[in-house]
Image: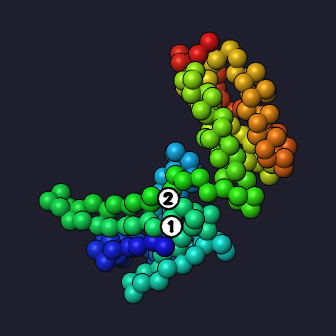
């Protein structure tokens, strides 16, 4: 699934060795998995960070905790460390992190992002705009933020109600509402 080179293990172990005793190992996760904005991250992992759905990799130096939600997107990922004259560089390559892997059993956030990035944003791009998911509330309300030409646009309410909200609610029936959290007082990039 994920490959961590010996040099990366040694480097990460050196970093972990300098941490407090409450650090269990490292945690690997992907922010906004399956979208063009996906970002693969490594962080120190403490007891409170471990989740039941996580997967754990063992090596002879420390534990690697893989975020359960990120697992499909970490397939074929590689972590390496190369020394150079400036010290060295840790590289993370996760070729599947931006690939949409969405099914009926996928988390709600992944399904919303899939619809936004594959159906809604291509339409908004013709006006230089985009929309992204900020969060999904406990009441299953999708909180969105518009950017580019959509921020401050006079037609954003119509775009939200008749375009984005309709598309999301039709395709993801468990959503109860869609809300815009964008500050539209900044009209410097607005399309209209």
Q: CA distance from mark 2 to mark 1?
A: 6 Å
Q: Secondary structure at mark 1?
A: loop
- Residue at 52% x, 73% y: name it: 65
- Residue at 50% x, 58% y: name it: 96
Place residue 90 in its image quadrant.
Answer: bottom left
Which percent across, then down, holds residue 43? 47, 63
Place residue 183 in its image quadrant.
Answer: top right
Left or right position of 158 against 149: right
Q: Are marks 2 and 1 in contact (CB under 8 Å)?
A: yes
Q: Earlier in the sequence, mark 2 or mark 1?
A: 1
Bin the neighbour count of mark 2 within 10 Å (Cα to Cα): few under 14, some 14-19, many 20 and up: some
- Residue at 73% x, 53% y: name it: 108
Query: In the image shown, does 44 or 142 lie closer to the viewer?
Result: 142
Which percent across, then down, holds residue 11? 30, 72
Left or right position of 99 against 14: right
Left or right position of 117 against 2: right
- Which residue position holds label 1? 75
Which percent across, then down, holds residue 59? 42, 84
- Which residue position holds label 2? 96
Q: Secondary structure at mark 2?
A: loop
Bin the neighbour count of mark 1 within 10 Å (Cα to Cα): few under 14, some 14-19, many 20 and up: some
Place residue 107 in its image quadrant.
Answer: bottom right
């Amino acid at each position: 699934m994920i490959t961590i080179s010996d040099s990366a293990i040694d480097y990460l172990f050196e970093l972990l060795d300098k941490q407090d005793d409450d650090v269990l190992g490292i945690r690997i996760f992907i922010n906004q998995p399956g979208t063009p904005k996906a970002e693969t991250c490594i962080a120190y992992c403490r007891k409170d960070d471990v989740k039941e759905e996580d997967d754990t990799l063992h090596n002879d130096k420390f534990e690697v905790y893989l975020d359960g939600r990120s697992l499909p997107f970490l397939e074929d990922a590689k972590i390496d460390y190369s020394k150079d004259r400036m010290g060295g560089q840790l590289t993370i390559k996760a070729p599947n992190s931006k690939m949409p892997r969405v099914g009926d059993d996928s988390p709600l956030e992944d399904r919303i992002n899939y619809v936004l990035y594959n159906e809604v944003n291509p339409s908004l791009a013709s006006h230089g705009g985009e929309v992204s998911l900020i969060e999904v509330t406990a009441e299953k309300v999708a909180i969105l933020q518009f950017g580019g030409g959509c921020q401050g646009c006079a037609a954003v309410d119509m775009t939200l109600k008749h375009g984005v909200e309709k598309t999301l609610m039709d395709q993801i029936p468990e959503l109860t509402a869609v809300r815009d959290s964008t500050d539209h007082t900044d009209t410097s990039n607005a399309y209209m």
